[in-house]
Amino acid sequence: MTVINRIFESVPVDEQGLDAALSVLRLSRRYSAERVEAACRLALAGRVRSPRYAHLQPILATEQNKAAGLRPPRDEPDKHGGYVRGAEYYAGGAK
């Protein structure tokens, strides 16, 4: 699991990440491994740098991981866009 790797990367000493990693792994007792993996992918796609049990358990409880496969991925907004008026606006109606 990439989430487990992220947990251990986010702590200075490996022993500090053991409880968090075990709690994530324990989610597979209640939910299927496929659902836990899908919840991990969904959490990693969000803004959370190192997802923990507190991030994954609500995703599984509300079944967001099942709906995540149905919706298209988020597109990043255009950086150069905005509300831009065309030439017709500045011409004052004269063509």
Image: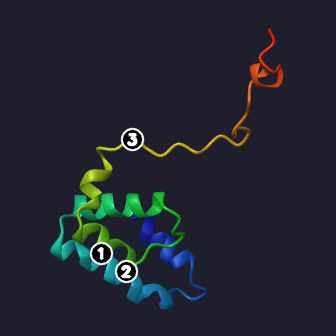
The type of residue carrying mark 3 is Pro
Task: Name the side, left or right, on which 92 lies relative to 77.
Answer: right
Q: Earlier in the sequence, mark 2 or mark 3?
A: 2
The quadrant where residue 70 appears: top left
Q: Name the image colouring.
A: rainbow
Identify the secondary structure beneath mark 3: loop
Q: Nearer the viewer, mark 2 or mark 3?
A: 3
Task: Name the side, left or right, on which 4 lies relative to 10.
Answer: left
Write down the residue under mark 1: 57
| Place of residue 3 in the rendered image (x, y in percent of width and height, measured from the top left) | 43, 68
Q: Nearer the viewer, mark 3 or mark 1?
A: 3
Write down the residue under mark 3: 72
Write down the residue under mark 2: 54
Q: Are marks 2 and 1 in contact (CB under 8 Å)?
A: yes
Q: Earlier in the sequence, mark 3 or mark 1?
A: 1
| Place of residue 20 in the rendered image (x, y in percent of width and height, measured from the top left) | 40, 84
Q: Please name the residue shown 58% across and 45% down the image.
A: 76
Which residue is situated farthest in the front direction here?
A: 93
Q: Residues within 10 Å of mark 2 (few under 14, many from 20)?
A: few
Which residue is situated farthest in the top direction here?
A: 95
**As displayed, is residue 4 above or below residue 13?**
above
| Place of residue 57 in the rendered image (x, y in percent of width and height, measured from the top left) | 29, 75
Task: Name the side, left or right, on which 31 lies relative to 47.
Answer: left
**As displayed, is residue 4 above or below residue 33?**
below
The CA span between labels 3 and 1 is: 23 Å
